[in-house]
Amino acid sequence: MAAYSRPVSVPYSCYEIGHTWTPYCGHAVKDIAKVGFKESLKIYTSLYLLAAILRKRGKKYYLKKLIPEIIQSTIFLTTNAFSFVAFFCFWRYVCRKFYLLSTAYLPAASAAFVSINLERKSRRGLLALYVANLAIETFYRMALSRNYLRPLKYGEVLMFSIVSAVFLYLYRTKGGLSSSVASGIRFFVGPEEHADSSGDNDPAEELDQSSTQRLSTNKYVNIINQFQQNIRQGSKHQLCKHSFGCFHYVIKGFIHMFGIGYSLQMAIKLLPALFHNFLQPNILVKSVIHSDNFSFGAFLASFCAAFRSINCALRWIRKKDSGFNGLIAGFVAGWSMLWYKSTTVALYLSSKLIEVLYFKGIEINMLPHIPSADKILYMLSTAVLFHAAIFEPQSIRPAYWKFLLRITGNKFKTVNRRLLDIFQTKASLMDPEYWPKYDPAFSDLVKP
């Protein structure tokens, strides 16, 4: 008769493993709630204010909706933080020991389910998609660390190209995408390639044309204007919906998106430098001329230019304008990520595509509608992330690890992961020498 081994467990208390800064469970929950509320309020105040400014919200929103939305999201995130500690202690009491799943996965799933019900319905899907993307990336890192997978050279670029191909096929197909998703793609490639585009003249181009006519008094300006006119009046296929010639259409998209990409990346680097290094001009200058700014600008510019040029070329070659053109152009344009390789971007867009295809499957009755799918996805994905944060923090995205430290006041670092090395997940790999300072009245553990 076969003998079954008992599951691995550790007999230590929740104080000895988890809330090592205080032996009292209630105090631990209260400590996390305090710092969690403070940091959550900072995060959501800046986030909602920035979103309101970018969306040009009216006075009514600022007076009636802004503060309630900030408070509700703050309560959601704070609850997620402190209830994890509460359920950590609860599951230790129920199981009497710490097992692999009861240490982090069950407490995190329980906390996530409670907290997501406190957030607004309109944000649950976005949150679920965000943490699902992080969970997929974490699984990938775990698989690499265990040698289950081998890194594929340019794997993120290939993934991005495939996703781009499908998205832009749908973009070039009537009714292929919802208005919100289509508007996001329109920002990067322009409205002319959208299946629902009427092909009307671009107001910006008309404005540009009239402005150059007014400036034609200077002979050097006349030369430049003549050059621009020649480019504008270049040939285009009768199926092309853009106002001027194909060459002008491609060049304009390249220059426009390079400026946007360079500016966005520069702002990301410049804003923190302004806060922390205001009196050090050399650091500010480096933020402005950083190579990442150029790389990101080149990525967006070449993506837009490649997509536009291939669509135009296929209209000339195939004498057709269809979603197939978008499929080919999207795949080729996706390789522009060689300028700015990003696993995060590739995984996020992949998960977004899965969401889009899932809802399209529901529309045509090929897939079932799962009630509360956003809650379930958030709960399971968050559980994976917290499980990894306890047992192998080296496998989660560094930015998310910093977020967890911020929202808990660095308390995630104080978990005694050396006691969890028995589960063979290399829990203490990030800080193998760390050992908490225990109160002798509550624990007789000493550093090995």
Image (cartoon, rainbow, N blue to C red):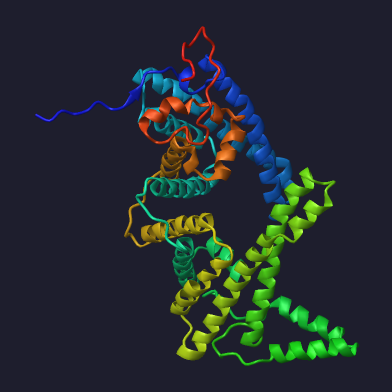
Tell me residue 31's x, y (percent).
60, 22
Q: Is residue 212 above or below residue 47?
A: below
- Residue at the (82%, 46%) spot, across then down: 278
Residue reaching furthest front? 448
Tell me residue 404's x, y (percent).
56, 36
Which is nearer the eye, 73 or 333? 333
Location of residue 201 (image quadrant): bottom right
Tell me residue 74's x, y (percent).
61, 35
Q: Is residue 217 above or below residue 87?
A: below
Location of residue 64 (image quadrant): top right
Q: Is residue 374 left or right of residue 193?
A: left
- Residue at the (58%, 44%) spot, across then down: 399
- Residue at the (72%, 62%) spot, across then down: 263
Residue 172 in view: no
Q: Is residue 113 above or below residue 243?
A: above
Q: Quadrant of the N terminus?
A: top left
Which is nearer the eye, 115 or 433? 433
- Residue at the (56%, 19%) spot, across then down: 21
Q: Is residue 267 left or right of residue 396?
A: right
Residue reaching furthest right? 217
Which is nearer the eye, 115 or 387? 387
Which is nearer the eye, 101 or 245? 101
Tell me residue 246's x, y (percent).
61, 86
Q: Is residue 407 above or below residue 355?
A: above
